[in-house]
Image: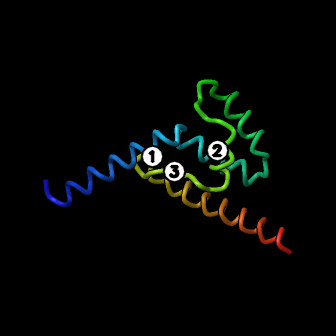
Amino acid sequence: MDKIQYNEKKQERREKKRKEKRSIEAEEVIFIFEKVLEEWKTIKIFNTLIQKNPNSFIDKKKVETISKGNCKIFPSELSEERYKYYCEIREKVYSYWSSKKDKLHL
């Protein structure tokens, strides 16, 4: 196995591991980001996700973590257009929280 193949396999293993650890779908992550920008409370986001999909493995703590923008989605999980949207909305979430943080320190 050469270096390139090794790195590809390593990347695949990492993606698989991180997707399993995240335990929710990429579209649910995007939904959380959208609702954060609409200024929904995390408990409301959580309740809405559970109502939409009662079999979801998400918990309140995970929603709180993801709502801060701390969630990696891989390009292989979404269409190219949807992945670009995810990247844009993730940046907006980061900006949203940093502006909120700045207001608290004033």
Q: Give the x, y percent position of residue 19.
A: 46, 43
Contact flag, marks 1 and 3 (Cβ < 8 Å):
no
Amino acid type for the residue under numbered disc 1: Arg
Circle 1 SS class: helix
The numbered disc on residue 10 is none
Please state which of the two labelled residues, at mark 3 or mark 2, is closer to the viewer: 2
x and y percentages locating residue 13 in the rendered image: 33, 46
Kind of residue indicated by mark 3: Arg
Q: In the image, is 18 to the left or to the right of 104?
A: left
Where disc 3 sits, the SS reads: helix
How far is mark 3 from mark 2, CA to CA? 12 Å
| Front residue (pair 38, 64) | 64
The residue at the point 67 percent across, 34 percent down is 49
Q: Mark 1 points at which residue?
A: 18
Q: Which image quadrant for residue 28?
A: top right
**Label 2 sits on what residue type?**
Phe
Badge 1: how crowded within 10 Å, few (<14), some, or many (20+)? Answer: some
Front label number (1 vs 3): 1
Distance between the Cα atoms at labels 1 and 3? 19 Å
Q: Which residue is drawn at 59% across and 29% down?
A: 56
Above-or-below relation of 106 to 19? below
Q: N-terminal of the two: label 1 or label 3?
A: 1
Residue identified by numbered label 2: 31
List x then y, in percent, for residue 65. Answer: 64, 49
**Residue at the spot 75% in from the left edge and 44% down from the top edge:** 42
Q: Mark 3 points at which residue?
A: 82
